[in-house]
Image: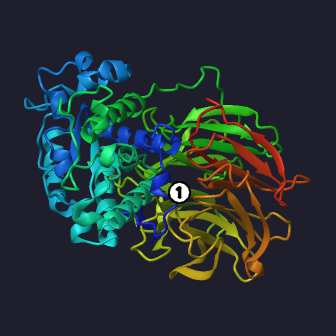
Amino acid sequence: MPRRLALGLAAEPLEHRDLPTVSFESLPVLPFSDPAGLDTIRAVATRGRELGRNADVFLKFGDSNTADPNYLVPLGSPGFDAATSGLTAIAPQAVDTLLAYQTPVGGGPNSFARVGPTSVPGGTILSLRPFLDGELAATNPAVALVMMGTNDFVIGDSSGFRGAYTDLIRRLADAGVVPVLSTIPDSYFNGGMNRPKVREFNQVIADVADQFRLPVWNLWRALSTLPDEGIKWDGVHLTTSPNGGGRFGPLDLQFAQNLRALQAVQILDWVRDNALSPPAAAPLPADDAWVPPAAARPVVVAAPDATQPPVVSVLDAATGETLFRFAAYAADMTRGVRVAVGDVNGDGVSDVVTAPGPGGGPHVRAFSGVDGSVLLNFFAFEPAFRGGASVAVGDADGDGRTDVVVGAGPGGGPRVSVIDPADLSVKQDFFAFDPGLRTGVEVTVGDFGRDIGPAVAAAPGRGGGPVVQLFRLTAGGAEPLTAAFAGYPDARTGLNLAAADLDGDGAAELVTGAGDGEPEVRVLAPADGWAERQRFFAGLPTERRRGVRVAVVPAGGERPAVIVTGNGIGDPAAVGVFDATGGRTLAYTPPGDGSATYGVFVGA
């Protein structure tokens, strides 16, 4: 008997990336121009709102330079005056944020003045981490200012720091606390012998931030312009103005803790204005009517990535015209929507299948192509899992019926479930790769012909290698078939997948899109030994650096199949249509703000 849907996944840390993607020295001091980072902190803040985080509280996580009573504490004192301190003159927009964070925390000191167990002289990540859960429970913060590494490099290597730092950031993000990551100051202790370590550990901070798509506050760069780089005579600790740490006049800002406090308030203000304030829901236009897709009029389904309302757009594949839009989930679910298209109820009309992106639950829904009614509504994995899911629709086992294939999102193992939409029974449940892989798994379905036939294709998500593995589903389980790389083997881009017969030979080609980096699309023929049929960029290599999502509109009659692409997070929202040779035939912007830089998921 097939098993009923009752699965669970452990939300564990993503594997870390081995290669830095950008030098920390080149990062700006303040991250206000990082759209991908902004999208990420919005997603974390949304999680925080769901958990009831207090937007008027932040947490400090750091060592002696953070525990220094000259850092931020003066801003929380009863006598602090924004005008006389110089703050109003230099950052007037941040005064409201200052006042908000001067609110007492749980009847005790406010966030500026609080001396908690997560900011302690001599602290390392490993020594302070055991106190994190208690401090989160005691203060319920929405933001954490994190500056760690100065003591960590004295007692350990960068590999161990990377693992501990990654775990810390994931714990904060999973708890709905926006992590603000700061590079560490230089060190002149012992004649400057630790300066190479400072650079090594700052690179780890930048690399982990890039892994999570989080912004970086480059304090190291800010302090490099100050006298003695803002370092005291002891070579380690930061300087403070003789007027105290709560002064922001021109001369005061030549001292490290004063400049750091100013920038902390500016960043808190940026986070508060752009992420902590709940986004306005975007209701559907009242005149949107459901239009059943017709076989003669192929459609593309486009949905936004994180930070946007979960509004799915159904577009004419030939013109880009919006046929209709609908909300796949509640308006406050802003984790992104993964989409697939297929006939799940056997009525001959294509339906739309959805799942939340990372940060959302594995909540799969299917909407009737006839009238938009909900056909399926279930959790593919344990409801508490917050990695989201990838979805695909097709005949996965060759029985002539459509299946829904779900892959666990990042944070869970590379688990794949093949579900019968007729009764939600689980036909297959397997790990596509080593269960320890924590990048999530992308899936698609196709009939790859010849010796392969119907199969599920799986690839690691962003952070994993660009490898594709095919599986034949049998009564005995999922049988691994052939596999291939669709990118440089040592890359950590992961892949996005789609499958369809592009050349009319009866065997599906596999279309891959880089999960990160340059928007490279490849067309591979598994039945012909993974011959590469085509390779092209969905945009200029320098235009998009966050990968590309892919789908295929199948051929019909005289109409050839076409490849559809959506941009990665951080790029201007756009959908592209390409013929089988990689030639662009159409480009259009999904409904909404044309200047927005959210990613777009596509299905066809």
Colour scheme shown: rainbow
Q: Percent from the top left, x then y, of residue 125?
A: 22, 60
Residue projecting furthest to the left = 108
Q: Percent from the top left, x then y, of residue 270?
A: 39, 32
Residue 266 shows up from this direction: yes
Q: Vertical placement of 99 versus 484: above or below?
A: above
Q: Vertical placement of 449 versus 217: above or below?
A: below
Residue 9 shows up from this direction: no
Q: Secondary structure at mark 1?
A: strand
Q: Vertical placement of 582 versus 339: above or below?
A: below
Instruction: Please tell me how crowded label 1 is: few (under 14), some (14-19), or many (20+) other residues with Cα within 10 Å.
Output: many
Looking at the image, residue 599 sits to the left or right of residue 217; the answer is right
Pick the residue in front: 142 or 529.
142
Q: Vertical placement of 460 versus 134: above or below?
A: below
In the rendered image, which quarter is residue 50 located in?
top left
Q: Percent from the top left, x then y, of residue 596?
A: 59, 34
Pick the residue in front: 476 or 335.
335
Q: Percent from the top left, x then y, of residue 396?
A: 62, 68
Looking at the image, residue 553 sits to the left or right of residue 151; the answer is right
Pick the residue in front: 456 or 374.
456
Looking at the image, residue 204 sits to the left or right of residue 583; the answer is left
Looking at the image, residue 13 sits to the left or right of residue 502; the answer is left
Pick the residue in front: 121 or 365.
121
Residue at (16%, 37%) from the top-left corner?
Answer: 70
| Residue type pointed to by label 1 | Ser
Q: How many marks on residues?
A: 1
Residue at (83%, 55%) from the top-left corner?
Answer: 579
Residue at (70%, 76%) from the top-left corner?
Answer: 453
Quarter of the figure with the N terminus = bottom left
Q: Which residue is mark 1?
A: 390
